[in-house]
Amino acid sequence: EGEPEGGDNGDGDVVDAQAGAVPRQLTTYDGADGAPDGASAPAWSPDGRTIAYIRGGAPKLIYYGQQDLALVPVSGGVPKILTADYDRNVTQPAWSADGKWIYFTVEDDRTQVLARMPADGGKIERVVDGRRVVENFSMSSGKIAVLNTTTEPPSTAFALECGTLAQPPHQTHPPRPPIHPARVHDPTARPQD
């Protein structure tokens, strides 16, 4: 107690930004309170009272355990798991500027899309969907930038405008010799029975 943990059980701690402050443990889950690969940083709510984080799956399932979006009060208390009934991994939580929404990425059938849900729980809405991988996103002043890739172009930055990905003019690729990428097909399989 009072000492940050090591190993695979990464409980969430907070510490005041002052000399001599002692860390205070916020989460006590047996598994990782954070994405197992460390790729998802916790996100403070705009009012500073709540932290959104990714709770890893059950330790016995290792990487097959589902990652869920969770909230915990900075003052302490029982975490609220927002995506417990959602059968997809989620990562990269981020709050809207007004604190009403939490944005995150969702893994689904060889894709990773951008979604959001009300901060108090409720229906998950896909914001950027389709056969793509949203590698990362950033939010500022009510605007969203997305690093997106598909099977065609390399990773490219886009602005999300009115529900549509728009490539900013200064980000367009310079003219280059034509390339002919291999055609990519989704694998399919049918069971024998």
Image (cartoon, rainbow, N blue to C red):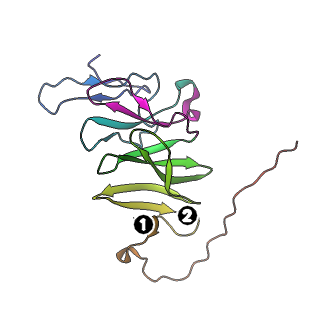
Return the x and y of residue 158 as percentages of the image width and height. Answer: 42, 67
Q: CA distance from mark 1 to mark 2?
A: 21 Å
The residue sitting at the top extreme is 1
The disc, 1 or 2, on the residue closer to the chain's N-terminal end is 2
Q: Is residue 108 above or below residue 131?
A: above
The x, y position of residue 1, in whole percent, is 29, 16
**Is 6 positioned to the left or the right of 47 in the image?**
right
Q: Which mark is residue 150?
A: 2
- Is residue 180 a member of the stretch shown in magenta? no
Please name the amino acid that badge 2 sits on.
Thr
Reading the image, the residue beneath label 1 is: 162
Residue at image point 41% right, 39% down: 38
Q: Is 96 on the left-hand or right-hand side of 189? A: left
Residue at 83% x, 45% y is 191
Residue 3 in the image: state x and y as whole percent: 28, 20
Residue 145's disc is none
Viewer-nearest residue: 190 or 19: 190
Q: How many numbered marks, from 0 up? A: 2
- Quadrant into which the C terminus falls: top right
Residue flagged by tag 1: what amino acid is it?
Cys
Q: Secondary structure at mark 1?
A: loop
Picture coordinates of residue 31, whole percent (x, y): 47, 26
Q: Which residues are magenta?
A: 61-87
Q: Quick one: label 2, few (<14), some, or many (20+) residues within 10 Å?
A: some
Residue most extreme to the right: 193
Foreground: disc 1 or disc 2: 1
